[in-house]
Image (tube, rainbow, N blue to C red):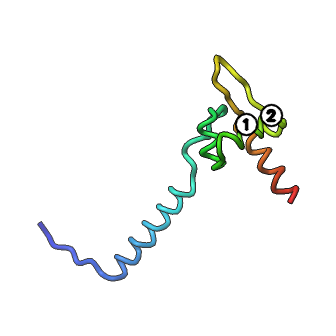
Amino acid sequence: MAAQIITKEDLDEFREKLLNDLKTFLGKSTEEPKKWLKSYQVKHMLRISPGTLQNLRVNGTLGFTKIGGILYYKYEDIVKMMEGRKSAK
């Protein structure tokens, strides 16, 4: 088994490659958001209380669909609502 000498330049080159690979890996979102979210997911995503979510439903700010007692919200409706809030301020 032959010994190999690793130089500082080799380590610097390895570090640069590793950092670039990590940036590429972390920059890509491998998981698409779900099309439909349940209430607990929306509350967690928006960091709001159950009462606030209910107010958004009641005043028509956020549309929903009720199936078998479970409320579902479209992900794209949530995004549109948030974008509308940003532009209104």
- Residue 89 higher or lower than 29, as above or below: below
Q: Residue at x 74, y 30 (%)?
A: 64
Residue placed most toward the observer, 41 or 10 = 41
Amino acid type of the residue that numbered disc 1 sits on in the rendered structure:
Gln
Amino acid type of the residue that numbered disc 2 sits on in the rendered structure:
Val
Residue placed most toward the observer, 64 or 22 = 64
- Label 2 crowding class (10 Å Cα cut-off): few <14, some 14-19, many 20+? few
Where residue 61 sits: x, y (%)? 82, 40
Image side of residue 71 versus residue 77, left or right: left
Image side of residue 55 versus residue 29, left or right: right
Mark 1 element type: helix
- Residue 5 higher or lower than 78, as above or below: below
Q: State the mark number for residue 40.
A: none
Image side of residue 39 versus residue 85, left or right: left
Mark 2 element type: helix
Quarter-wise, where is residue 88 in the image? Answer: bottom right
Image side of residue 86 versus residue 3, left or right: right
- Residue 56 higher or lower than 65, as above or below: below
Marks 1 & 2, CB-CB < 8 Å contact: yes
Question: On the rendered image, what quadrant is the C terminus found in?
Answer: bottom right
Q: Residue at x 77, y 35 (%)?
A: 57
Where residue 8 sits: x, y (%)? 33, 82
Where residue 6 sits: x, y (%)? 27, 77
Question: On the rendered image, what quadrant is the N terminus found in?
Answer: bottom left
Q: Which residue is mark 2?
A: 58
Q: Which residue is mark 1?
A: 54
Q: Residue at x 73, y 25 (%)?
A: 65
Residue placed furthest toward the right: 88
Residue placed furthest toward the bottom: 8
